[in-house]
Image (spheres, rainbow, N blue to C red):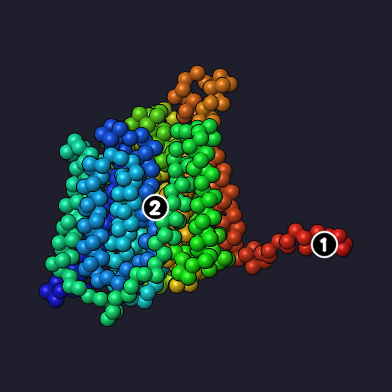
Amino acid sequence: MFRPWVPERVRPWMYIVFAALFQLSSGVYFANLQHMMGATSLMREDIQLVAMFGVVGVNMPFPFLFRYKLRFTNQQLLINAALVIAACNILALYVTWLPALCAISYIAGYFKLCGTFECFSNIRLWLSPKQDFGIFLPSMYIIILAAMPGSNWIAQQMTILTGSWQSVHWLMTALMLTVALLVFICTQPWRMMPFRLPLVSLDWLGCILWSALMLQVIWLFTYGEYYNWWDSPLWRAVLVSFPLTLLVTIGRMRHIRHPYIDPKVWPHARLIPILAMFFVAEVMNATPHALQGTLTGGVLHWGFTTTQQFYLFEMLGYAAGCVFTILWGRETPNWGRLPRMGFKYTRLLSVGFFCLLMYQVLLYFYVSPSLNVERLWLPTFLRTFGYAIFFATMTIYLKDLIEFPTFFMALTVSGFIRNGVGESVCSGLYNYGLRRQIADALSRGIHSDYTQVLMVAIKEMFGVMCLIGTFTLLLMLLYDVQPVRSTMKRMLPLRKLVRLMASR
């Protein structure tokens, strides 16, 4: 793919840098939420919805990625992805109409994953010559997960340095144009196959329908508190339209030859437990945005110049968790001399979830009006460390349990929980729980000060999460005990159980 004059040692690292820049880019940067609200006259919920459109866009290209790779050259894919993202960053500065801004964010997220996949697919054998996904996937997630707080940190730093929230868009535009220029200069049109595979059999409408299904759920829980849930006719209309979209999507999936998601993916025995585990991790990982953000902003009144340091510890935690996952397996990576421990991945899941639980426990005891910022460094690191372990390990399980032809479809299905829906649902429920706790405390006259009531409500919500997390961790530890696992049996169906009891 590279031209002969490019040194061989530099080539894979160029792809690493390109992938990192793709992941740092976005159509809308959530760290600039307050500034965008003032400049565009949009509500907080509107900016959140626009950001979630980008997250959904990242999830949807998975079933098409290999078809793109067999249709276009490496040079075409990378240049087009970089140019489209650069154009989206420029358009996001001047477009204020909410539907158009949502479409821009979705397109930017879509091509963001296309460019990232093209970079990592070319260096897969460089990262793991034995094609060990226990090495390749965590190595990839070091960049993918660390780029999420990294993008927000860069956005806030650019705002502080230049005094303008638009500066990060111009920076990312310049970086994407630089990527396109370097790809054009350093690579040549190389094709994996001697012919171009057509794209006529791709289910574009199925992709749109599944995207709409996700975005309806996200809209319901993003605007739920604003419209007071059932009290709004608009909210009820969107709720009624959701099952209709679901029926149309499932009907199309079952009756066309090449659906966007093959029906064979859903009956897989291991898929539902994996989705359930992803949802539990999202529930535990959503508390910083809904509860910690309310604490630091509504009670402690910290500005973004204070909270931006959390992004650094999040990046460190994500990277450390992925490296720990790599060292947990059995085979030794060729790029390092550190031996791997060779333990079971079920124990690794327990370690990751324990770190997520410790974040909830520490925050429960830390909630107070005298909390200083340094005390939140360790909980932030533990949460991201555990989430990186959980995220990478569950993806490794998904790769081992799902056949390769449907693996990328299964990634999209798991992304229904991981990419946007899980976070939106949990944030909406947390906000609803806080409002109920505050209203209950004020109605009973327990406290007269609203700030004190808010702080008590946050503490109670963290306490509930500690109980849920402890119960889940006990189940995971029980499953990891070999004598218990070997003697587990499925419960009899209710009809057989009634007949068996009646015969006795």
Name the residue at 47% across, 33% down.
227
- Residue 482 visible in rendering: yes
137 or 23, nearer to the observer: 23
Give the residue type that dot 1 points to.
Answer: Arg
Q: Is residue 496 above or below residue 198?
A: above
Name the residue at 62% across, 65% down.
485
Direction from residue 40 to residue 413 in the image, left or right = right
Name the residue at 37% across, 61% down.
61
State which tag comes first along the sequence, 2 or 1.
2
Q: Which mark is residue 146?
A: none
* Residue that numbered label 2 is attached to: 56
25 or 438, nearer to the observer: 25
Q: Position of residue 349 (x, y in %)?
A: 49, 58
The quarter of the rendered structure image containing the C terminus is bottom right
Task: Please rate how many residues cluster around mark 2, counting C-alpha atoms within 10 Å: few if below 14, some from 14 to 19, many from 20.
Answer: many
Q: Is residue 482 above or below residue 26?
A: below
* Residue that numbered label 1 is attached to: 499
**Callout 1: helix, strand or loop?**
helix
- Residue 319 visible in rendering: no
Q: CA distance from mark 2 to mark 1?
A: 48 Å
Give the residue type that dot 2 points to.
Answer: Val
388 or 160, nearer to the observer: 160
Name the residue at 39% across, 70% down.
201
The quarter of the rendered structure image containing the N terminus is bottom left
Mark 2 vs mark 1, foreground winner is 2
**Residue placed furthest toward the bottom:** 194
Total labels: the figure holds 2
